[in-house]
Image (cartoon, helix red, strand yellow):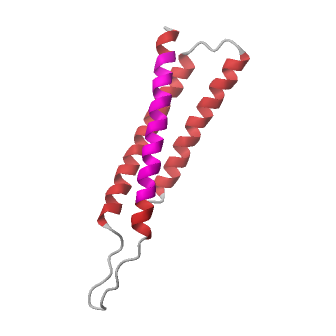
């Protein structure tokens, strides 16, 4: 059974990195669309707040953060179920767990500011 959880942990770690990369790419696109100044408008027509695509990107990024958090929970559960017998394995597992928690926290903070 530890072999199953080892494979599940590897898959979850890979999925976590892919999701975080997708979040980073979409967050950069969001920042690009919100940083572009609106075209000059006459006083009769109010200037738009931001591009409509920025709202969509914000919604998608927040969804990806939810997937990152769910995936981190699955990875940490798989990590706990793996038989970590030596101190080196425990320290390595702790490092992976803290890294996943940091990814979730950083993504969540960035998504809240959108």
Q: Is residue 95 left or right of residue 69?
A: right
Check residue 7 for magenta coloring: yes
Task: Give the residue furthest to the right.
Answer: 87
Q: Is residue 12 above or below residue 49?
A: above
Q: Residue 105 location in percent, x, y? A: 55, 45
Task: Give the residue furthest to the bottom.
Answer: 43
Q: Is residue 95 above or below residue 25?
A: above
Q: Residue at x 45, y 56 (%)?
A: 28
Q: Residue at x 71, y 19 (%)?
A: 88
Which image quadrant: the C terminus? bottom left
Q: Quadrant of residue 93?
A: top right
Task: Give the residue furthest to the left.
Answer: 44
Q: Is residue 49 above or below residue 55?
A: below
Q: Quadrant of residue 52?
A: bottom left
Q: Main secondary structure of the magenta part?
A: helix
Report the number of discs: 0
Q: Residue 40 location in percent, x, y? A: 34, 85
Q: Is residue 96 left or right of residue 47?
A: right
Q: Quadrant of residue 41?
A: bottom left
Q: Residue at x 47, y 43 (%)?
A: 21
Q: Residue 61 location in percent, x, y? A: 40, 50
Q: Residue at x 47, y 55 (%)?
A: 112
Check residue 102 for magenta coloring: no
Which residues lie in the magenta part?
6-29
Task: Give the residue furthest to the top.
Answer: 1
């Amino acid at each position: 059974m530890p072999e199953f959880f080892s494979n599940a942990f590897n898959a979850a770690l890979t999925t976590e990195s892919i999701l975080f990369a997708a979040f980073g790419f979409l967050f950069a696109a969001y920042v690009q669309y919100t940083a572009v100044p609106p075209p000059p408008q006459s006083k009769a027509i109010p200037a738009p707040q931001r591009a409509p695509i920025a709202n969509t990107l914000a919604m998608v990024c927040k969804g990806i953060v939810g997937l990152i958090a769910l995936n981190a929970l699955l990875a940490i559960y798989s990590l706990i179920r793996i038989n970590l017998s030596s101190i080196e394995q425990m320290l390595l597992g702790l490092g992976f767990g803290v890294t996943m928690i940091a990814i979730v926290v950083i993504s969540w903070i960035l998504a809240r500011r959108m």
